[in-house]
Amino acid sequence: MMAKIDVMSIEGSVQKSIELPHAFSERVRPDLIARAAIAESTLKIQPQAHYVLAGMQTTARYYGAMNSYRTGRHMGMAIRPREKLGGGVQGKVRVIPSSVKGKRAHPHLIEKTTVENINAKEYQKAIRSAIAASKRPVAVTSDIETLKKTKDLVKLLGRLKLENYLEDGQKKTQRKGVRRLASQRRYKKSLLIVVSNDSSVLKAARNIPGVDACSLEKMTVSMFAPGGNPGRATVWSESALSKLDQEISKHSI
């Protein structure tokens, strides 16, 4: 028998009870959640490569056989690719990696594989596991998806007695040490709102510290388990819960 959850109205009163989707009954697998979160993070890695002609756009050339005329007789190989200057003068060493402004010894390759793949069914299981690990899921009628103003959403979260998550999201965490840069301060993201599609409430939630919002189509493991750590509080619209199991089957990396 599936567990039930009360569906709240936007006024904060209980409207009815519905059964939770099968995803909430999934066994929590912290190892699988962490693996999926890492796989998602690799999608943000930007491939790097060097300029093909870096260190090669120079007049430096090898002069030929080691003992031939004007080849730098009895010189080591490292000093032979020199710039050609006027009057038969040899300039600075170029081209080789050990020289000043020479080419890079082991440059980045654009062909390098940076994305860590994960099987589709394994990823779907990780999403269900992250959802099942979410603490205190709250269900709200589909009217939440019609909210357009941030102040209306803040009032709703207050009626649902979730204001403590908003206060926690406004607290700054700062690294210890002498240097404290603005980039080192972070806001906690403690509450997630999930709706069925791209609705106006997504824009209403984006300016509230401590609150994230997403649609079923764009949900990821990292949203339910930031950094691979499961247990994030979530607010669901009723229509999102009704489509959850069906939508998870479409997700993959």
Image: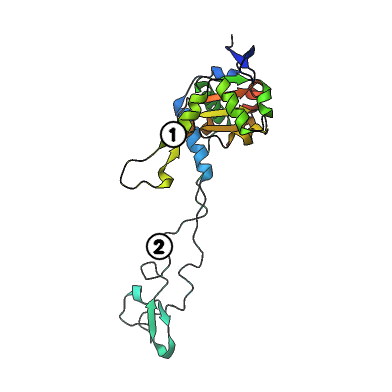
- Residue 249 is situated, as x and y percent measured from the top left of the image, at 63, 27
Q: Secondary structure at mark 2?
A: loop
Q: Residue 239 sits in which quadrant?
A: top right
Is residue 64 something one can see in this rendering? no
Task: Give the residue at mark 1.
Answer: 171
Q: What residue sits 55% from the left and 27% below the top? A: 127
Quadrant for the C terminus in the image: top right
Q: Is residue 139 visible?
A: yes
* x and y, in percent, of residue 170 in the image: 47, 34
66, 44: nearer the viewer: 44
| Of the pair 50 and 171, the residue shown nearer to us | 171
Secondary structure of residue under mark 1: loop
In space, the residues marked 1 and 2 are separated at their CA atoms by: 47 Å
Seen from this angle, which residue lies furthest bottom?
Answer: 87
The mark nearer the N terminus, 1 or 2, is 2
The structure residue drawn at horizontal position 42% and vertical position 59%, both measured from the top left corner, is 106
Q: Which residue is mark 2?
A: 105
Name the amino acid type tagged 2.
Ala
Q: Label 2 crowding class (10 Å Cα cut-off): few <14, some 14-19, many 20+?
A: few
Using the image, determine if residue 18 lies above or below residue 177. above
- Disc count in the image? 2
Name the residue type under label 1: Lys
Q: Is residue 86 above or below residue 109?
A: below
